[in-house]
């Protein structure tokens, strides 16, 4: 395991998430389609960030492990593993949830898009730094 690559990928994933759901990218349409229409407080519990970071760390560790197993320790190889995991595992799971909860398809694209792009970027980082 390449712990430097794992930590860098985790931090970059957290930054990507902050940007993805910010006013710069998808905050406005995401907020408009939320199931709970009550206004958000504007402040999140620090524990939410800790749990999110642990989830990103687990994803980075797993991505590193799969890249190592596949022998795909290059930027392109890692990116392909990451996007394959996102499109092959995460996007279909979120799609089922989206369909059965009758949520707008645009919401699916925003919510599923983040982990797919996140895994792509984490895979590229881990691959480039050598899993």
Image (cartoon, rainbow, N blue to C red):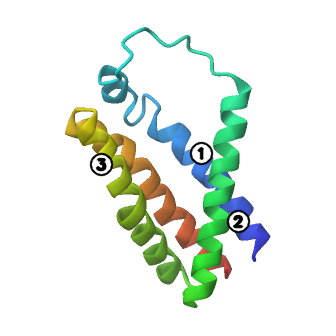
Please say whether residue 73 is visible from this viewpoint: no
Q: Which mark is residue 6?
A: 2
27 sits to left or right of 72: left
Is 51 rendered above or below residue 28? below
Q: Residue 74 versus residue 108: which sits nearer the camera? A: 108
What residue would you read off at disc 1? 15
Question: Which residue is found at the position 63% from the left and 52% from the top?
Answer: 56
Q: Residue 88 versus residue 12: which sits nearer the camera? A: 88
Picture coordinates of residue 54 (x, y %)?
Answer: 70, 48
Farthest-out residue, right: 3
Is 1 rendered above or below residue 104? below
Question: Which residue is found at the position 35% from the left and 29% from the top?
Answer: 30
Is 125 rendered above or below residue 42? below
Q: Nearer the viewer, mark 3 or mark 1?
A: 3
Q: Quadrant of the C terminus?
A: bottom right
Distance from label 3 to label 2 (Cα)?
27 Å
Sequence-earlier tag: 3 or 2: 2
What residue would you read off at disc 3? 95
Q: Nearer the viewer, mark 3 or mark 2?
A: 3
Q: Residue 27 versus residue 119: which sits nearer the camera? A: 119
Question: Which residue is found at the position 29% from the left and 36% from the top?
Answer: 107
Q: Which mark is residue 115?
A: none
Residue neighbourhood size for the residue with mark 3, other residues' Cα within 10 Å, grouped as few (<14), some (14–19), many (≥20): some
Distance from label 3 to label 1 (Cα)?
24 Å
Q: Nearer the viewer, mark 2 or mark 1?
A: 2
């Amino acid at each position: 395991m390449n712990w430097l690559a794992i930590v860098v990928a985790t931090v970059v994933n957290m930054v990507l998430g902050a940007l993805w759901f910010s006013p710069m990218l998808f905050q406005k349409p995401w907020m408009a389609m939320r199931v709970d229409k009550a206004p958000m407080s504007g402040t999140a519990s620090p524990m939410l960030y800790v749990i999110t970071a642990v989830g990103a760390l687990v994803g980075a560790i797993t991505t590193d492990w799969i890249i190592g197993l596949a022998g795909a320790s290059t930027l392109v190889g890692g990116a392909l593993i990451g996007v394959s995991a996102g499109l092959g595992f995460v996007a279909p799971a979120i799609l089922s949830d989206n369909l059965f909860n009758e949520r707008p398809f645009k919401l699916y694209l925003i919510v599923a898009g983040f982990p797919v792009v996140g895994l792509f970027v984490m895979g590229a980082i881990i691959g480039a730094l050598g899993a």
